[in-house]
Image: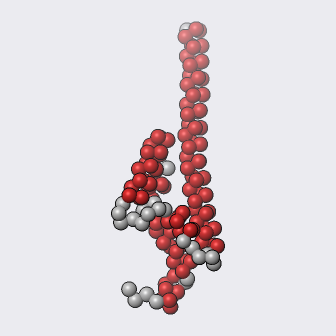
Amino acid sequence: MGINRPSLSAAFGNKEALFGRAVERYERGAASYAHKALKKPRASEVVEALLEGVVALLTKPRNPGGCLVVQGALACGENANRVRQELASRRAAGVAAIRRRFQRAIDEVICRRVLTRRRSRVLSRQSRTG
């Protein structure tokens, strides 16, 4: 490939920056199913898309096994604490996004129930008063 240390440094600055770009590309590509899933209108569709996405990611022969954001932290050397911290931060952000999406689903159900009760009361009053 003709890539040596000076050309790598000129293009990316260092291995850490190169790895960061690789993770960004991974999240926009192979792992983009997660971002798309969280945009689904119903919680059941979110779950379905997340499960289908991870199965597709892990079973495609051209993809290496596992998740780069998880496995990447395990493959780092001792001097890669910033990389491990960045990957941990990305994992935490993913978990937080999923929690927010399901909290939104819970809030929507609660809101629908409250509105249904209010409508029922209004209709009940109207039917009694004519």
Q: Number of callouts in the render?
A: 0
Taking depth in this image into account, of 21 and 68 the one nearest to the observer is: 68
Residue 109 x %, y %: 55, 34
Q: Residue at x 45, y 59 (%)?
A: 32
**Residue occupying the far left of the picture:** 61
Q: Quadrant of the C terminus?
A: top right
Work out whether 116 lies above or below 32: above
* Colour basis: secondary structure
The image position of residue 11, as x and y in percent, is 49, 84
The residue at 35%/63% (across/down) is 61
User: Would residue 128 be seen by someone viewing this image from the given angle?
Assistant: yes
Q: Quadrant of residue 104?
A: top right
Q: Is residue 52 left or right of residue 15?
A: left
- The answer to whether residue 27 is seen in the rendering is no
Q: Quadrant of residue 85?
A: bottom right
Instruction: Locate residue 60, reporting x and y percent.
Output: 36, 60
Most foreground residue, 49 or 35: 49
Q: Position of residue 52 (x, y in %)?
A: 41, 50
- Residue at 59%, 76% in the rendered image: 77
Quarter occupied by residue 94: bottom right
Q: Is residue 113 above or below residue 73?
A: above
Please tell me which residue is depicted at 44% across the width and 54% down the height of the picture.
54
Where the N terminus falls, by quadrant?
bottom left
Give above or below for 31 relative to 111. Answer: below
